[in-house]
Image (cartoon, rainbow, N blue to C red):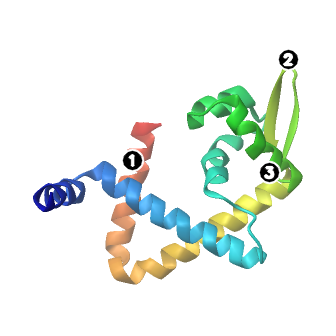
Amino acid sequence: MQRRLERLRKRQADSLGFLLIRCGQLWNERGISQVNAEAGRPVLREAHTKLLPYLQAPTGIRITALAEHVGVTKQAVQPLVAELARQGLVRVEPDPDDARARRVALTAAGVEAMLHGTGVLERIERDVAPALGKAELEALKRSLRRLLAVLE
């Protein structure tokens, strides 16, 4: 068993996907912790952070499409959207193209909250920057921007 675990750790250390996922998880955990500490109460959960990148279109997104993007059912997304709506961060409206469908979009307060959250992520970047050095950090960001463009 010990040998297999060592083999697993070696493969993970050599896996770009694993490294990206693990770094993303740890960065996300720090960000959520800092946002909640600054709010003085839990306002952000990891489940919310999975929705946020898809809410930035000015016209919003259908709840069914949002669920598809995050890989869950509409029924799983609805309570998360309802939590964000109660906090005033999103609004849910009928879809103008289909009265049966609902669209969710950021409110002005939601955009401000995302700007604040991005500021928290930037602070984490400043905290880890000395360990990488300016040139390495900039090279990493350039590579990740290119990778993001390929993946999107």
Instruction: Residue 63 in the image: state x and y as whole percent.
Output: 74, 31
Please tell me whether mark 1 sits on a helix, a strand or a loop. Answer: helix
User: How packed is label 3: few (under 14 Cα within 10 Å), some, or many (20 or more)?
Assistant: some
Q: Of the two numbered discs 3 and 1 on the same chain, state the one appearing first in sequence.
A: 3
Amino acid type for the residue under numbered disc 3 = Leu
95 to the left or right of 30:
right
Location of residue 59 with respect to 120 vertically, above or below: above
Q: Mark yes or no: residue 24 visible.
A: yes
Q: Callout 1, which amino acid?
A: Arg
Coordinates of residue 97 in the picture (x, y in percent): 83, 17
Q: Could you say whether the residue bearing mark 3 is in a helix, strand or loop?
A: helix
Q: Are marks 3 and 1 in contact (CB under 8 Å)?
A: no
Which badge, 2 or 3, comes first in the chain's sequence?
3
Residue at the spot x=32%, y=57% of the render?
19
Secondary structure beneath dot 2 equals strand
| Label 1 sits on residue | 146
Of callouts 1 and 2, the N-terminal one: 2
Name the spot of residue 125 as percent of width and height, x first: 49, 73
Which of 140/67 is in front? 67
Q: Is residue 121 visible?
A: no
C-alpha span from label 2 to label 3: 21 Å
For marks 3 and 1, give the CA distance.
31 Å
Residue at label 3?
84
Residue carrying label 2: 100
The residue lying at 70 percent from left, 71 percent from top is: 36
Image quadrant where residue 108 sits:
bottom right
Residue 131's place in the image compared with 6, above or below, is below
Q: Nearer the viewer, mark 3 or mark 1?
A: 3
Of circles 1 and 2, the one toward us is 2
